[in-house]
Structure formats: C-alpha cells, structure tokens
Amino acid sequence: MDTQTDNKTAHVVVHGGADSFKQEITVGKHALVADEPVSAGGGDVGPDPYDYLLTALGVCTSMTVGFYARRNKLPLENVKVSLWHSRIYARDCEECETKEGMLDRIDVEIELTESLSEAQHAKLMEIAAKCPVHRTLTSEINIRLRAATITSAS
C-alpha cells in the first residue's frame, strides 16, 4: 500500500444513500451536491458526474490560460471555455488510436477576448492543452479502489 495516501484525511468525500442518485460532496471546506437528471431517474438537484468532469477541465483550462497571459503580460481580458461530452464510434475518429468500439469525446471551445495578435492567440491555445487536468485526462490513469476499514464505536 502507498503510505502517502493511506494515512491522509481525504480531501474529497462523497456520501449518498441507496435510495436515490443524489450525492453530498465535501471538498475541503466546500459543500457541493451531485445528481442525475430526471430523465435518468434522478432529482436534478445538482450537476451529474460528467458535468463535474467537464467543469474540472474547463476551470483548469481557463485558469492556465489566464495565468500564462498574466505572467507574460498579454492583453487578454476574458477566457470563456465551453465543453461537451459525447460517446462516438472509434472508427469515426480519424485522429484516435483506438479504431474499434466506442470512445469518449470531449469537445472544448475556447473564446479569448481582447486584441491579441495571431501569434499570441495561437500560443494561448497551445497553452490551453497543457493545463494539469487536460494532461491527466490524456495520460494513463491508475485508479486504486479499496474497501474502507470500518471501526466500531465501543
């Protein structure tokens, strides 16, 4: 076992009952909620899991572009990142390595406002693909599941 994670207090904790899709999320000192839409059997009281995934990528992309622009004193005023998730047939994806079955596709549209030169705009678009969440999602991910140790109150 990895001692780096075994003795840490979890930063993100998700708790839900078996009676619905609604989940209560604690992220440090922040409280969030997740759910499925009514069409999927949920109560639609919060974003669904893929909404949170897209949110993480969009926030990271916008923060990374903004940070780079500030650090390099580029005339960037606002960043707007719009995202969509879909499932597509691998055979329909020319740039994908996988050619069989279905795969997930995330489309990201980035709007940069202010008077940027063509070169500045191109550089910021290049930087957008280097945000840490983008890198995580496009790299190998190792997710380790384990049962929690339940301690009884005596």
Image (cartoon, helix red, strand yellow):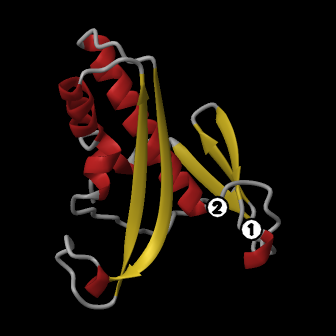
**Occupied quadrant, residue 48:** bottom right
- Extreme residue in the bottom direction: 100
Q: Residues within 10 Å of mark 1 (few under 14, many from 20)?
A: some
Quadrant (top left/top right/bottom left/bottom right) for the N terminus: bottom left
What amino acid type is highlighted by mark number 1?
Answer: Pro
At 80% from the left and 56% from the top, the residue drawn is 45
Q: Residue furthest top?
A: 73
Q: Position of residue 71 (x, y in %)?
A: 26, 12
Q: Are circles 1 and 2 on residues that touch, CB within 8 Å? A: yes
Quarter occupied by residue 74: top left
Q: Which mark is residue 48?
A: 2
Q: Position of residue 59 (x, y in %)?
A: 47, 38
The residue beneath circle 1 is 37
Q: Is residue 127 above or below residue 37?
A: above
Above or below for 39 versus 53:
below
Q: Is residue 74 above or below residue 24?
A: above
Residue 116 picture quarter: top left
Amino acid residing under circle 2: Asp
Q: Residue at x 21, y 81 (%)?
A: 98
Name the residue located 27 percent from the left edge and 29 percent from the top edge: 121
Per the image, label 1 sits on a secondary structure element best described as loop
Above or below: residue 21 compared with residue 134: below
Q: Residue at point 47% right, 41% down?
A: 81
Q: Is residue 24 visible?
A: yes
Q: Position of residue 101 (x, y in %)?
A: 32, 90
Left or right for 115, reference 28: left
In depth, the one of 126 and 27 nearer the eye is 126
